[in-house]
Image (cartoon, helix red, strand yellow):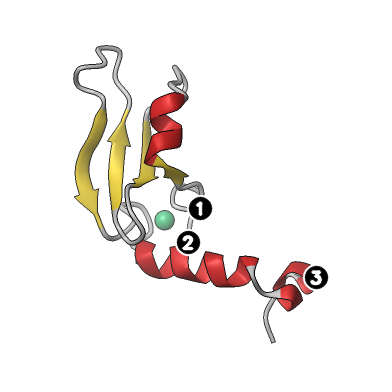
Amino acid sequence: MCDFCDNIKDVEYIRKHPSWERVTEIAQTGENTFGLWVECEDYYYSGIAMKINFCPICGANLAQEALLKKERANNPYYQKYGFDF
Ligand SMILES: [Zn+2]
């Protein structure tokens, strides 16, 4: 996991919070579906440019990483110590 795919946002959140600083981001469009979000000045063209399964920077499997993140959020050991036993 890299900085790019560590910051996955929900697609509805991105739609509700347009940003001039955002250029490209990974958006979660469903439970296990992800898309490459491209922000554009002309909002007709902004949105999901393509569906992706892997991070274009580091190649991480996004569905696996999202599942791991969810498990860690529910794991009291991980929350307390920062790693799993
Ligand atoms: Zn990555």
Question: Depth check: 1 or 66 in front?
Answer: 66
Question: Depth check: 85 or 59 in front?
Answer: 85
- Residue under the point 24% across and 53% down: 52
Report whether the residue tagged 2 is closer than 8 Å to ligand 1: yes
Q: Earlier in the sequence, mark 1 or mark 2?
A: 2
Distance from label 1 to label 3 (Cα)?
A: 20 Å
Placement of 15 over or under 36, stated as above or below: above
Q: Amino acid at mark 2?
A: Met
- Residue under the point 63% across and 65% down: 73
| Residue 6: numbered disc | 1
Q: Check if mark 1's residue and mark 2's residue have beta carbons within 8 Å.
A: yes
Residue bearing the label numbered 3: 80
Left/right placement of residue 4 relative to residue 43 reads right
Left/right placement of residue 3 relative to residue 15 reads right
| Residue 39: numbered disc | none
Provide residue 40's location: percent of width, then percent of height. Answer: 29, 19
Residue bearing the label numbered 2: 1
Does residue 9 show up? Answer: yes
- Residue under the point 32% across and 47% down: 29
Q: Earlier in the sequence, mark 1 or mark 3?
A: 1
Provide residue 9's location: percent of width, then percent of height. Answer: 46, 43
Mark 1 secondary-structure assignment = loop
Placement of 55 over or under 13, stated as above or below: below
Placement of 15 over or under 68, stated as above or below: above
Provide residue 3's location: percent of width, then percent of height. Answer: 51, 49
User: Based on the displayed image, in which of its 4 quarters is residue 83 positioned?
Assistant: bottom right
Residue found at the far top of this picture: 42
Provide residue 41's location: percent of width, then percent of height. Answer: 30, 13
Q: Amino acid at mark 3?
A: Lys
Report whether the residue tagged 1 is closer than 8 Å to ligand 1: yes
Does residue 22 show up? Answer: no
- Residue under the point 75% across and 77% down: 77
